[in-house]
Amino acid sequence: MWQYILKRVLGLIPLLLVVSFVIFMFIHLIPGDAARLIAGKKATLEEVQAIRENLGLDKPLIEQYLLYLKDLLSGNLGYSIQSGAPVSKLIGERIMPTLGLTFMSIGWALVVGILLGVISAVFRNKWPDHLGMLTAVSGISLPNFWVGLVLIQLFSVQLGLLPTGGAEGWKSYLMPSFALGAGIMAMIARFMRSSLVNTMKQEYIRTGRAKGLGGNAIVFGHALKNSLIPVVTIAGLQFGFLLGGSVVVETVFSFPGLGRLLIDSIQMRDYPVVQAEILLFSLQFILVNLLVDIVYSFLNPKIRYQ
Amino acid sequence: MSNIQPEVVTTDRIVNERKETHFHQFWKEFRKKKPALISLFFILFLILIMIIGPSVVPYDPAKPDYNRVLESPTLEHFFGTDEFGRDILSRLAVGARLTLSVSISAVLLGAVFGTILGLVSGFFGKLLDRSIMRVCDVLFAFPDLILAIGIVAILGPGLRNVIIAVSFFSIPSFARIVRSATLETKEMLFVEATRSIGASNRRIIWKHIFPETVPTIIVYFTMKVGTAILAAASLSFLGLGAEPSSPDWGAMLSKSRDYIDSSFHLVFFPGLIIFLTVLAFNLLGDGLRDVLDPKTKD
């Protein structure tokens, strides 16, 4: 087991290097002179030059990249052009609300998704299945920003029950996490259903039936545990979907999280912040995928020996 | 010489008839999938609107009418009017062209590049395969929408850049899917037979392997269009896509946010049409998968 984990972690190093290089190149891929663009139209030549030096754009590319890596490893993510504050501080202020939102979303999505998937699989091709899968395909097709706006109209404007935005108190997390989790819930439900249907076709389930186990005992005692394995993978893969969605949902609810910071920074051309945020998002994504692989190999030992 | 000519025609006819029966078979199966069939008609209807929309809409979608600002749905304006008194139904109909063409062309670009990469990767294997798959891994290391937002942040907002951004994150998934289909087909006996009679690699790939992967590509393409519409609408909603004043569905939603307290129809209808369109592509994709690619069905 440890050997497998070590192998997987070491295997990530080349990927991390390439990803960090791609993100490093981000600021260099901006068409034209990045420093001039950041400084704005009214900036003097000196100001542009100051920004260029501040960002280290006057040094050779490879030296810039090595400096960037060195800074990253020491936890220095650069400085915001707008406020001058360290990017790590800006991100630190925003990370907790986003994490809270993410976990709430994936939490309810897992519970409801698995439940919906199990109901659909148990009543396969009957009306609860059709209803469940129609709910699921609708969930995948819903634009999350629209769900957010409809919720605001319903619960804030009409009923006056929930705040329209912000991140104060648990109430302000309810609508954003619903809007964010709906798509994932739907995908988990679909995978749960097909995974359970597949498991139910296996030999050992037939053995269980032959020895006289009833329907529920088979589903909950044997089949469910085994069919959860692929669902874990899917839940992990959908994490990226969640990160992207958080940007949109946080904008709808004026939620003070990382996603909102990303959009604000893009609009203000605060490239160091944008760069650091994209790095953070892809790092989270890579780490979650690694974690999923490890959990998966733990649940399914066959994988470790391939 | 004279007796060669009719024979060629006959072979042609046989081939045509075989194609026809393929299609008939497909249609017979597909017809039974009611949700997919309804979705197909809905999508065809949208495509019709895309083509003739601008000439049949009841009102000029760009012309303001300050006597009818922010009117709720009435018999004259089924979906109500916006903050400039423009008919929302007309704007949605004209916007279909923008929204659908952006999403479809983005997925088309992704499919073309992804398919070529997948075929080459699966067919030639070895170092080429490994390099292409590593590049895909790097693209996969970024969540879809974050990658798209990053690309638009570099290139600047606008629909052309949205197309580039959305096609970029479609490429690796098409490449992977086509690659695994290629690997499977490559091992089949008929490919070996073709190779043994001396067919070139190019011919084997395009004449024999590619056609086998087409059903998978069609299924995946349909589903990806749904994703692309959502991604493009999200970018427009965030102010990174279509011009805020254009009748793009995402852009219409973005502007409507300011009127959510008083005129909810401004928010409701553009979102509803995005939802229904994406739902139609997803349901069609599910139906096509069940018929064309049954091994992936539960």
Image (tube, grey):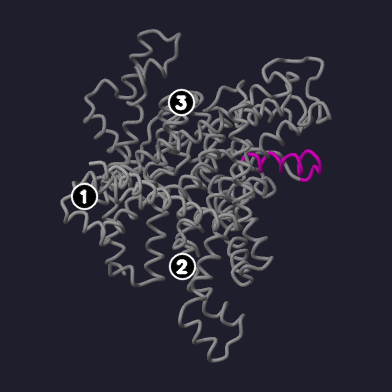
Residue plotted at (67% across, 34% down): B270
Chain letter, disc 3 residue: B
**Cα distance between the residues tagged 1 and 3:** 33 Å
The residues colored magenta run A145-161
Residue plotted at (26% across, 33% down): A65
For residue A102, side relative to residue B79 (left or right)? left
Q: Which amino acid, by three-letter code, is at mark 3?
A: Arg
Between discs 1 and 3, the one toward the N terminus: 1
Co-location on one chain, circles 1 and 3: yes
Q: Compared to A110, does B252 lie above or below?
A: above
x, y percentage for residue B186?
26, 56
Q: Residues within 10 Å of mark 1 (few under 14, many from 20)?
A: few
Q: Main secondary structure of the magenta part?
A: helix
Q: Which amino acid, by three-letter code, is at mark 2?
A: Ile
Asked if the stretch drawn in magenta spans residue A151, the answer is yes
Which residue is denoted by mark 1 in the rendering? B124
Q: Compared to B257, does B198 lie above or below?
A: below
Q: Compared to A235, does A146 lie above or below?
A: above
User: Do tag 1 and tag 2 residues touch (Cβ < 8 Å)?
Assistant: no
x, y percentage for residue B264?
76, 34
Pick the front one: A137 or B47: B47
**Cα distance between the residues tagged 1 and 2:** 33 Å
For residue A162, side relative to residue A95 (left or right)? right
Q: Secondary structure at mark 3?
A: helix
Pick the front one: A248 or B204: B204
Residue B160: assigned label: 3
Which residue is denoted by mark 2 in the rendering? A229
Co-location on one chain, circles 1 and 2: no
For residue A121, side relative to residue B160 (left or right)? right
Q: Which amino acid, by three-letter code, is at mark 1?
A: Phe
Q: Residues within 10 Å of mark 3 (few under 14, many from 20)?
A: some
Q: Quadrant of the N terminus of chain B?
A: top left
